[in-house]
Amino acid sequence: MYVAVKGGEQAIANAHKLLSEKRRGDQAVPELEISQIKEQLGLSVDRVMTEGSLYDRELAAIAIKQAQGDLVEAIFLLRAYRTTLPRFGFSEPIETSRMEIQRRISSSFKDIPGGQVLGPTYDYTHRLIDFALEIPDNGNSETCRAEVAAEAIQNAMPRVADLLLAEGLIEDEATDNDRRPVADLTRDPLELPAERDARLQNLARGDEGFILSLAYSILRGFGASGHPFLGEIRFGEVTVELVPEELGFPIEVGEVSVTECIMFNRFMGSATTSPKFVRGYGLAFGHCERKAMAMAIIDYALRSRELGERSEYPAQDEEFVLFHSDNIQASGFVEHLKLPHYVDFQADLVLMRNRQGEFRDGKKEGRDERELEDEKAAKEAE
Amino acid sequence: MCMKNSDDIPLLKVESISKYYGRRIGCLGIEFELWPGEALGIVGESGSGKTTLLNCISGQLEPSEGAVWYSSNGGVIDMCNAPEPQRRLVMRTEMGTVYQNPRDGLRMHVSAGGNIGERLMANGLRHYGQVRRRALNWLEKVEIDQERIDDTPDTFSGGMQQRLQIARNLVTRPRLIFMDEPTSGLDVSVQARLLDLLRGLVTELDLSMVIVTHDLAVTRLLAHRLIVMRGGKAVESGLTDQVLDDPQHPYTQLLVSSILQP
Amino acid sequence: MKKQLKRQSNTGKDRPRIMAGYNFAYLDEQTKRMIRRTILKAVAIPGYQVPFGSREMPLPYGWGTGGIQVTASLIGPEDTLKVIDQGADDTTNAVSIRRFFSRTAGVHTTTRTREATIIQTRHRIPETHLRNGQIIVYQVPIPEPLRFIEPRAKEVLRMHALKEYGIMFVKLYEDISRYGRIAKAFDYPVLVNDRYVMSPSPIPKFDNPKMDCMPALQIFGAGREKRIYSVPPYTKVKSLDFEDYPFEVERWSRCCALCGSDNSYLDEIIMDDRGSKLFVCSDTDHCNERVAGGYKGNQAESIEEAQISTGTGARKCA
């Protein structure tokens, strides 16, 4: 007896109900507060904001909760919400040299003006599971309070790249002041060859894992020759300014925290340009050092065409990198295989059965008689 | 720009072609004419600019200066400035290029038949049986076993790959063919067979040819005229036998003396 | 209309069903205008893939975001929408998309092909002939018919621009040499208006002939790949083939077990673990209409309806 499958709508609704139940988990355990996610899963929030292309800690935290901690799903939620937001203006470029520094290091110089500021970092921690964290330290926050320095960190720390610039040892990027509209991949399709602004936006939105692995491939030799130097990585708060049309001068609209990374790469010069260091640039919302560094490495790798260098590895291949970096596109397309495909599969079944039939009937592999005759005729004709 | 094509104008007229890579010279001020049915050899050591020149005149590289006039079936066209559709049409119907490395000129994962048939189908042939017949025909012409028609070139020997490249180019009966070191990388007996085959085809099809090589023996066999290049410049040119038997320029003399005389 | 979503700290049970706070059909009017401009261009150049600023939708890429954006920018309150997936109105993704539009646009929906003004589809063209004035919107995963032959976008663009399709035929040639036939069962490439080679989306090649000179407007949306293309009404659509290996469609040696139709696309249903099979129309509306009209297949007596179940283990929430 054949049973026709019906009632998808009810089934979907039920599945979603079940999902809500799973999300909540054991009712005996207190429900997560959004503020807890914001405060205690801050790095997740940062990643979701970066790849979700939307700076909103509250929304990102809700998305993480809604997605049961699946960050790609949370990024998706943020992106879809972002689509519905009206755009009322463009901010001025943020000035990271005036960043309120929380962390700033350079591995290219032992000491730099303003000093090395370690800030909050997992570097040099021993990755030993801290069993003390198993039991919440209710109210007793003494153990996790850092001491405050006697004097404030000086603001306005010059960027390390600017120090080299004074000597003419690094390319000058400040020349691009023509104010042409900056590419926006959330409004316009990616066009190739892509300019650096579009590439950087793509990388900033790109999946951390993908960008990281590509950067790794370069360092292992599947990419640009030599190995880049970490010019500087800094993390802290910058102000966002906007010039309202009716005012004509910038006003401060808020503050965002960002991680910025500049890598130095050797460029040996060409017939017309002198040898110098060139930059790879990375920027992420919040504290995302791994992402910002990987991005800076890929940014440089993708400049091979512009710098007249050979590009022969995946990470230098603009089409390959830019078309495959987005985890929302990638996961959507990979997971679409869960959708029914039985019409197409039926078509392939028909094809495959025909092929098998021919194979069993002992016909010459892949040819039919008409063709064999053709060949015979052709031979005779010669 | 279109003049009537007739016998008293050259098939290809190259006017003062130069190509710079930054400040480095690829080739400088090269001029020549190629007449229907003629084979021109460009010789020189590697780095002398001969491949750069070939790429400039075969439409694969934009020269920095100069012009290339090709007298196509539809009139004379300026190969450096013609609209891309027109240029690509001429390149796939009236011209062919045989590359030094067969990987540049063949689709390695497409069968021999498909490789030969591509130009026919690109030019509108929509009959499988005819494509196949002509592919078989050409396999025989270039001395490849017809049984191999469904095999891919990556299963072929180097000599067979070069012969397949030739078949793939000649199947549409082009008028002009460019060859870049077609015999280097092959061992001597295979070279001789390929050259023999080429000589036969050039005569049979009344082909014009520009052949780049470092091997003077190849030009002796195939080329009517020679251009000797060094440092991107033409240092000597003339009839092949004349240049090889009585070289004038010291560099040509050096080249000639460095090979064994037959 | 105000587009700001009211933030709700409450994610619990009392969320309103109608999505207040979103614009009609989700997209803002500016985006819709951009997509309409793209569609106009696509209609003007049949078969040409027009890039557009595809937005991120609340449904995943690859699940019909292109089709949804096209439908969202075309649909008006007086439209009647039909959504099918694999030919059926009640497959999960079709249900989900239909629900999306009833929630965001409140439009009338139908399962009847004849009643619909807009039909959004994945992988099928309805068996019922579409008429002039209807619009069929295809969901497209990979709009580029040359993608698996030449993955380079820049090179492919040039091939389309110069109408250099030799390599496409090399592919067909290779199929015949290897398999004795063109081994493409779905997403079978077509030439539109004698100019552009186009992907018909992964419909079975059985449906290809329906595209030729179809009275309805056909629009194809690829969200992830950010392309829209179109076949205007009454436009020539030819499936690529060789003169001596002409295009042909699948044939079944049997009829639909429910309605007895002998000329519709059939789905194969595996009935038990001994491999007994049943063939039924993939187009559920077509089948129902025939059954209602008194047509009968050989199994029509023993049909029963069931619900898809969700849940784990012993638990069922059907």
Image (cartoon, rainbow, N blue to C red):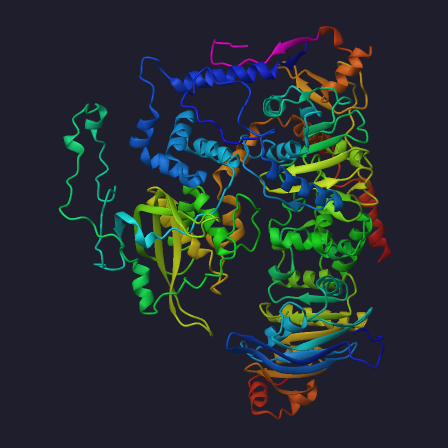
Quarter of the image with the C terminus of chain A is bottom right
Residue B51 or residue C152, whichever sits in front: C152
Q: Above or below — where is A315 with respect to A329?
A: below
Q: Is residue B25 magenta?
A: no
Magenta segment, prevailing SS (helix, strand or loop): loop
The residue stretch that appears in magenta: C303-318
Measured as percent of width and height from the top left, residue C96 is found at 59, 23
Measured as percent of width and height from the top left, residue A287 is found at 33, 42
Q: How many marks?
A: 0
**Quarter holding residue C77:** top right
**Quarter holding residue B28:** bottom right
**Quarter holding residue A135:** top left
Measured as percent of width and height from the top left, residue B254 is found at 55, 88
Residue, x 76% and y 20% (percent of image)? C286
**Outermost residue, front direction?**
A246
Q: Above or below — where is A45 with respect to B82?
A: above
Q: Is residue C305 magenta?
A: yes
Left or right side of C169 for A227: left
Instruction: Say whether residue A308 is visible.
Output: yes
